Structures are given as C-alpha cells and as structure tokens.
Image: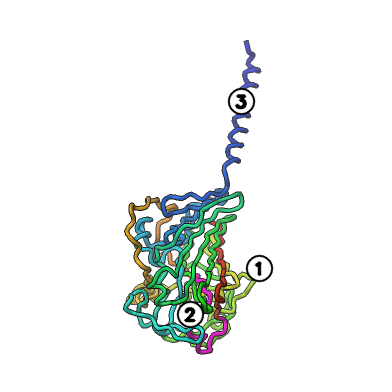
C-alpha cells in the first residue's frame, strides 16, 4: 500500500507535469495571427492584446482595438453597415487627390485636366477627397503572420476603371499593406506608374482617432511641424505660410479644447529615421502617429463643439465629412460573412475626435505647384514607384 507521503509526492509530481504541459502549450501558441473571414482579415498581436480589423474589399482598417478599446472612431453600428456605407470611417485612402482642389480641374506636367462632372464621382465647385474612399474593387494579395508580425496586403488596379481614368488619366496600380508588429500598426502604400508621363502624387488618408480614457476637453496635442499654411475662405492654401508658433504658441503642448481645427501644416520635424511625430495624450492614454519622409504635410481636423453651427460639430455643413463614392461593386453571389465588432467601447459622440491626416502634399498641391506657389509636389516617373508608410503607436491603453 502506498504511504500518505508517497501519494502526496505523486500528486505533486502529476501537478507539476500538468503545469509544465500547459506552459508548453501556452508558449506554443503563436504571438501573431492573420485570420480571414470573407472579405475581413483580423490581425492579432496576443502579447499586446491588439486586434486590427481590415475590410480587404475596401483596403480599410476599421478597427484598431487595444485591450478592448478602439482608438479609431466609428459612426456605424455593425460591420455590415460599414461595408454598405463606409463613409470616412476607419483609415480611408483619399485618392487620386486628397483634400480640396480650387477648381473642377487639376494640372500635371504643365497641362490642365478638366473633370467630367456628369460622371458624378467628382462633385462640387471645390472637389474634395478624390473618389476612391468607398471603392470596393480592391483584391486580396496575401494575409499572413510569422514570428515577428502579422500583415495583410490588397491591390487596386486603377487603370482598369474607365470612369476613374476619365478623371485622372494616369494608369497606375495601388497596393496597401497593414502590418501589425509589437503593438504598432504600419500603413504602407505603394503606387506604380504605368503611364508614359510622370504622375503627380497628391494622396492622403483621413483617419479619425479617439482616446477612451477622457474627452476632447482633456486632450493635449504635440505637432511635429514648423510651418502653418494660411488658408483662404474656401480652405485652399494661399501660398503664404507662417511659423507654427503663430498659430500654436507651444506646438508640443496644445490644449485641443482651445482650438477649432481644419488646418494645414508643413515643414515637418523629423527624427533620426526621417519620421515626423503627431501625438494626442489623454489622462493615461496616448497615440502617436508617425509619418514617413514622403508624407510632406499634415492636416489637423477637429471641430470644436463649442463653435458648432448649423451642420453641427462634425463639420458636415461644410462638406468636410462627405464621403466620395467609388464605382458600385457588382452584386455578390453571396453576402460576405458578418463579424461582430471587436471593441467593447461604443461610439460616444460627445467624446470628440482628432483627425491626423497624412498628406503627400498640402491641400491643392497639384494646382498650387502649377502656379508656382508650392515647391514640394512629388511625381513618379514612367514605370517608377512611390512608396511610404505611416504608423500608429498606442500607449497606456
């Protein structure tokens, strides 16, 4: 008969072996994963408890959820709502031009290209935000994960769409990669110029960010820029600039509650890696938006609710929140699978938002360059490529 001490020793040994086995199983679970459900890919970093949800048909990351908190503001109630009417939710690409143009035309290589307003994909006396933010023609290239990161890449063949080419007759392809590594999300864009002429680059992004530990009243901004572009009444840069301190006395300690923002900044401050840093800080949370060197300017958009009139705090009365439309996608053979939203925090309109908008050039850059008022317009030579990234780095979530 086994003694009591023997039985106790055996039990301890069994428990130890079981614990070791569980530890081995836990350590065998990969840190990074990329899970696909229909047209949605979810990138996961288990160590930082970060999930990024990307709708690949739009190439748009509509969530970045850190420990249950979504740092991207959303105005929709479900993934299906987002798919049907994406608007300016998530991280929408603004292309082939970002922000406003001063007329219903643009200039490139010394020539004027008039828009065909009857097509309907460019609208208004002051066209805004291009017409690709709701385009559902992106195709999935790959969704993978390894020991160091998880990523998803999608591609859009702009040159295949006659209505797009009619408005911007430069044949090109767009490729976007969302890469999650160490809790930081990289958004990489690559453009290949298939045209026989240089192609101007005037793209940008329009993400709306939020902190969930506080409201806009408590947020403090740090803006890594040196220059403020003066704007005309129609929000188009005049060509004149002033030191940023004329607008923000201390650009690295900006109390957001004191400002009504829809402004353009340039001459970005760069770190040793060539990145410019924009930051919003709440009570304990912080979000850094880092811009690679080919993003030459930043638009800050955050209307002050105290100054809201008519159209309300969202600025819709000025058309700022209106989404451009892409060509409607053909009817699908079956409805894509529906997924629940990952974040537990509901959208709170009174919380507010800050839009840090990475821009390849300032507002109206193509037309201002033609007038000799802007010197940093980028272009891609025939057969060449343009590539750049920006990064989202959350802390304190």
Q: Is residue 339 above or below residue 250?
A: above
**What element does badge 1 sit on?**
loop
- Examine the structure image and report whether residue 372 is included in the region drawn in magenta: yes
* Number of residues whose C-alpha sits closer than 10 Å to that of mark 1, classed few (under 14), some (14–19) or many (20 or more): few
Dot 3 or dot 2, earlier in sequence: 3
The alpha-carbon separation of the residues under discs 3 and 2 comes to 68 Å
Front in this rendered view, residue 386 or 254: 386
Location of residue 281 (image quadrant): bottom right
For marks 3 and 1, the one nearer the N-term is 3
Rendered-image quadrant of the N terminus? top right
Identify the disc placed on residue 14: 3
Q: Residue at x 59, y 30 (%)?
A: 18
The residue where tag 2 is placed is 363
Give coordinates of residue 326: x percent, y percent: 38, 68
Q: Nearer the viewer, residue 85 or 263?
A: 85
Q: Mark number for residue 19?
A: none
Provide the residue designation for mark 1.
273
Residue 328 location (% of width, % of height): 34, 65
Q: Nearer the viewer, mark 3 or mark 2?
A: 2
Compared with residue 330, is residue 33 higher up or lower down, i.e. above or below? above
Is residue 264 found left or right of 350 in the rendered image?
right
């Amino acid at each position: 008969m086994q003694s009591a001490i023997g039985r106790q020793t055996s039990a301890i040994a069994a428990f130890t072996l079981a614990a070791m086995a569980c530890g081995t199983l836990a350590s065998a679970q990969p840190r990074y994963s990329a899970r696909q459900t229909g047209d949605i890919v979810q990138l996961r970093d288990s160590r930082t408890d970060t999930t990024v949800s990307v709708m690949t048909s739009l190439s748009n990351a509509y969530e970045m959820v850190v420990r249950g908190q979504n740092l991207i503001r959303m105005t929709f109630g479900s993934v299906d709502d987002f798919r049907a009417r994406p608007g300016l939710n998530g991280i929408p690409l603004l292309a082939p031009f970002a922000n406003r143009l001063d007329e219903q035309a643009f200039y490139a290589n010394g020539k004027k290209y008039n828009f065909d307003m009857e097509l309907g994909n460019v609208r208004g006396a002051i066209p805004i935000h291009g017409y690709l933010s709701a385009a559902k023609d992106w195709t999935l290239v790959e969704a993978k994960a390894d020991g160091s990161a998880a990523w998803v890449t999608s591609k859009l063949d702009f040159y295949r769409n006659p209505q797009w080419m009619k408005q911007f007759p430069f044949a090109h392809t767009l490729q976007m990669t969302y890469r999650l590594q160490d809790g930081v999300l990289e958004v990489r864009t690559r453009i290949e110029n298939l045209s026989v002429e240089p192609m101007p680059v005037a793209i940008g992004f329009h993400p709306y960010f939020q902190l969930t530990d506080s409201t806009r009243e408590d947020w403090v901004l740090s803006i890594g820029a040196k220059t403020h572009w003066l704007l005309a009444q129609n929000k188009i840069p005049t060509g004149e600039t002033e030191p940023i301190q004329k607008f923000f006395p201390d650009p690295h300690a900006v109390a957001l509650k004191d400002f009504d923002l829809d402004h353009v900044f340039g001459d970005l401050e760069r770190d040793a890696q060539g990145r410019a840093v924009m930051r919003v800080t709440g009570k304990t949370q912080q979000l850094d938006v880092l811009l690679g060197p080919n993003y030459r300017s930043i638009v800050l958009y955050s209307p002050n609710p105290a100054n809201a009139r008519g159209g309300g705090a969202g600025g819709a009365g000025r058309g700022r929140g209106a989404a451009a439309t892409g060509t409607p996608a053909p009817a699908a053979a079956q409805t894509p699978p529906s997924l629940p939203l990952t974040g537990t925090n509901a959208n709170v309109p009174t919380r507010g938002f800050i839009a840090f908008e990475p821009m390849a050039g300032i507002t109206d850059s193509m037309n201002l360059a033609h007038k000799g008022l802007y010197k940093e317009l980028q272009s891609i030579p025939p057969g060449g490529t343009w590539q750049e990234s920006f990064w989202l780095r959350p802390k304190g979530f």
